[in-house]
Amino acid sequence: MVAEDLVPQELRVLVAVADSGSFTAAAERLGLTQSAVSHAVRGCERKLGAVLFERGRRGAVPTPAGERVAGHARRILRLLAALPGEARQGGPGEPGGPRGKVRIVAFRSAAGRVLPAVLARLAVNYPELEPEVRVVRDLGRGTAGEVADGRADLALATLGAAIPAGLLQAPLYREGYALAHQQGHPDPRSLPLVDWDENCGSYTADWWRRQDWIPPATINVSDDTVVLSLAAQGLGMAIMPMLTLDRLPDGLAVTDLGPERPSRQVGYVTTPELARTAAVRAVVRELRAVPLPEGASAER
């Protein structure tokens, strides 16, 4: 038997086991017996010629091959779920727009500053479309990783080398960085550095290395609002992307970092196959139609 023999139900079993972490939980989720799930997984492993899960006291943990296969399985199942809506699409001048669920992920500042206007336009222009939005921290594989793993149809992501291979990416805007510090401080660059886990140091690394005035971070937190609060109290300075600086706490000031200030490129990421679906095309259309938020410059 070969991989082409895999059927959708087997893919659903693989995804359920990967998501739930055990054969028993996957069986409950799918309404099957535990033995049926075990049999399906063994069959998939035989067809693919790879061990997909490590079985043990911790349940069923995907192997690296299992992680990759589960990601492809989610993407295949998503395309199958999109088929009815694609089949009912009207042609030019005919009724019938995109319908059904479209899954969008974004990091917090993009979700708060970009997506509301996009969702409002989608509600008016494509009332049968059902956007499902999740906020994902911009760490590791970030929002793009959710698309690669089949958990999202489209992501707003910081573009660059960290985007997983095989995905489509296109720029939307460029976002500069600025210095946040306590109002009235005579020399904010002399303050200690406060940073947060999601700050995109990797995207500004070259600029960062050239700045001999930036000390190592003395405080590192997991939330950008905490960074701003600490800076407002005079406990440090912070170098932040502009869209995180839209609602400043009392006592905080923002200083431009000059013409060579660092920036990051933000855009959308999707898969080649989902890029052709009507739902994703509709989201992209509205992303490109909305006005840019303050602090961002056009890259369209």
Image (tube, helix red, strand yellow):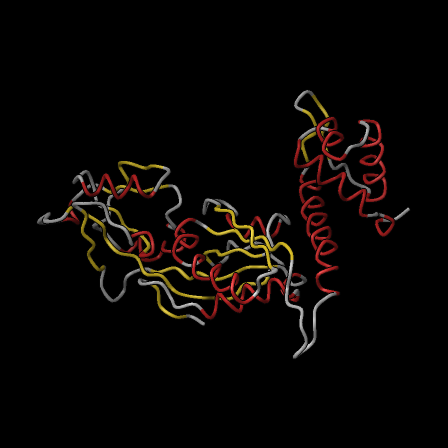
Q: Position of residue 133 (x, y in %)?
A: 52, 50
Left or right position of 283 against 77: left
Q: Position of residue 253 (x, y in %)?
A: 18, 51
Q: Position of residue 255 (x, y in %)?
A: 19, 56
Seen from the viewer's position, the closer of residues 116 and 215 is 116
Say if 14 sits above or below 56 in the image: below
Give the farthest residue toward the right.
1
| Residue at x 61% of width, y 60% of height | 128
Seen from the viewer's position, the closer of residues 142 and 96 is 96
| Residue at x 28% of width, y 61% of height | 261
| Residue at x 84% of width, y 31% of height | 36
Left or right position of 96 against 184: right
Q: Position of residue 234 (x, y in %)?
A: 16, 40
Q: Quadrant of residue 126?
A: bottom right
Give the farthest residue toward the top.
57
Q: Quarter of the image containing the C terminus?
A: bottom left
